[in-house]
């Protein structure tokens, strides 16, 4: 009895030292008796086994090979579905608690420009984080809400453990908003973008030819200049928010001229120029639930757009763009995209492998060597009636209990005390 008590104490202390919401320590385990959607060329594997060790997937195989592996624990998925953890993108998760309460929001600032890094304000304890895990989301690309500048700021990547070390990558891409200008012409936005790129390119050319001014020889480059240079070198993606086809075509010309790594977001009219976008190898991040013309820029919103773009050869990423409290519902958007013509496996890839590839995230696939972000479902994850059975981030099991669950328990559990005294 004393030995067991000491063991439990040791486990509790180790768990506290990890400082995350994880339910279990990293361990080796095998998931068996599952239909595994790998999001790789392996496709869908029936009755497969997935082996995880030290947070990394070490094997994906058929069930009969389990005896070949030594693991701490075997998890019977009971015929359920296993997928990579979904990856949300282009939202402000963790940067706002209540949208209507201004002081609880940190996603935007009128002074925000190309250097704005909102990761400084990220709160891994925001109540929306645990709720989002319920939707099978294990990682997320957070973006800035922007300000008065055409550049809204930069994106960063988080995991959804809720731990203090959740921010995994910062300054991963630059977000620029183009399109309709409420107080003038949209041409000014495009001109500002071109002007800044031209200026930076000329400076680089001068420096390469040794024409650097003697006065500025020892001067450190400004942060904004460094970021522009990273864009010109193709080291950092430029995420362009635009809906109208003519705006996107203009951006494709700018991309070609300056050799930029461009990603479109929004892209309501992208279906009109799908071949050009595919030829330019530009990924498109869209909200598959947009089905109405919200403005003169987005007359071609349609539930079938995701499927049409994918069929045309465009790398599609599905997203609840700009949201914070409905990121969990991403899987329903994918289900609707499938119902309106998108290939099922392509829809799965649009929330896993495609996001990982575009934002250089080492997850999004059930494959050897990949980070073990894994979700076990009791059925088709695109169905409303399905739910998460178990979830792992970096091979550690995570809770899917949210604040809403705790409130429900509080107010439905009988107590002799007034509610103010119960937790």
Image (cartoon, rainbow, N blue to C red):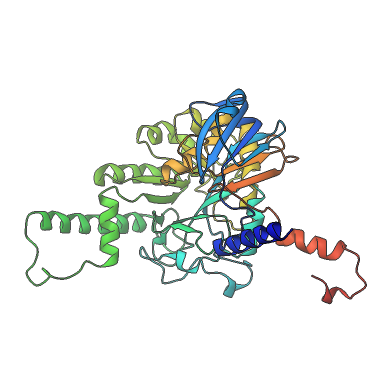
Q: Quadrant of the N terminus?
A: bottom right
Q: Look at 46% across and 43% down and name the residue there.
A: 356
Q: Residue furthest right?
A: 416
In the image, 109 versus 414, the foreground residue is: 414
Image coordinates of residue 20 in percent, x first then y, are 58, 60
Q: Look at 56% across and 63% down and name the residue there.
A: 19
Image coordinates of residue 311 in percent, x first then y, are 50, 28
Q: Look at 37% across and 41% down and name the residue there.
A: 249
State whether residue 305 appears in this view: no
Q: Look at 48% across and 43% down and name the residue there.
A: 355
Q: Is residue 145 left or right of residue 412?
A: left
Image coordinates of residue 328 in percent, x first then y, are 64, 50
In the image, 319 versus 291, the foreground residue is: 319
Q: Could you tell me how many numbered marks the image carries? A: 0
State whether residue 2 appears in this view: yes
When the figure is inspected, residue 163 is found, relative to residue 250, above or below; the finding is below
When the figure is inspected, residue 229 is found, relative to residue 262, above or below; the finding is below
């Amino acid at each position: 009895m004393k030995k067991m008590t000491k063991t439990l104490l040791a486990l509790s202390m180790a768990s506290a030292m990890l400082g995350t919401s994880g339910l279990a320590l990293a361990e080796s385990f095998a998931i068996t008796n599952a239909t595994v959607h790998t999001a790789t060329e392996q496709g869908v594997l029936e009755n497969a086994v997935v082996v995880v060790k030290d947070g990394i997937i070490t094997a994906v195989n058929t069930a009969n090979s389990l005896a070949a592996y030594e693991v701490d624990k075997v998890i019977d998925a009971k015929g359920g579905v296993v997928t990579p953890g979904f990856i949300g993108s282009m939202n402000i998760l963790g940067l706002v608690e209540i949208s209507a309460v201004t002081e609880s929001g940190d996603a935007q600032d009128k002074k925000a420009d190309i250097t704005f890094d909102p990761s400084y304000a990220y709160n891994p304890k925001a109540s929306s984080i645990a709720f989002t895990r319920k939707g099978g989301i294990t990682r997320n690309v957070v973006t800035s809400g922007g300000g008065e500048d055409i550049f809204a700021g930069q994106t960063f990547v988080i995991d959804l453990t809720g731990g203090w070390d959740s921010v995994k990558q910062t300054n991963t891409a630059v977000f620029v908003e183009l399109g309709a200008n409420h107080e003038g012409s949209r041409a000014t936005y495009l001109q500002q973008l071109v002007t800044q790129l031209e200026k930076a390119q000329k400076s680089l050319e001068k420096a390469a030819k040794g024409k650097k001014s003697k006065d500025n020889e020892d001067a450190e480059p400004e942060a904004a200049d460094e970021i522009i240079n990273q864009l010109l070198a193709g080291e950092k993606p430029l995420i362009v928010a635009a809906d109208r086809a003519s705006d996107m075509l203009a951006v494709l010309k700018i991309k070609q001229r300056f050799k930029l790594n461009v990603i479109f977001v929004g892209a309501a009219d992208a279906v009109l120029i799908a071949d050009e976008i595919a030829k330019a190898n530009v990924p498109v991040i869209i909200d598959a639930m947009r089905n109405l013309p919200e403005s003169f820029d987005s007359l071609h919103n349609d539930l079938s757009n995701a499927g049409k773009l994918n069929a045309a050869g465009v790398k599609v990423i599905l997203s609840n763009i700009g949201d914070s409290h409905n990121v969990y519902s991403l899987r329903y958007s994918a289900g609707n995209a499938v119902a309106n013509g998108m290939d099922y496996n392509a829809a799965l890839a649009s929330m896993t492998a495609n996001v990982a590839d575009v934002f250089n995230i080492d997850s999004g696939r059930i494959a050897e060597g990949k980070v073990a972000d894994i979700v076990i479902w009791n059925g088709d994850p695109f169905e409303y009636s399905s739910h998460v059975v178990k979830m792992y981030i970096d091979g550690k099991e995570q809770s899917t209990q949210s604040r809403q669950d705790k409130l429900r328990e509080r107010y439905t559990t009988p107590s002799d005390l007034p509610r103010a005294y119960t937790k």
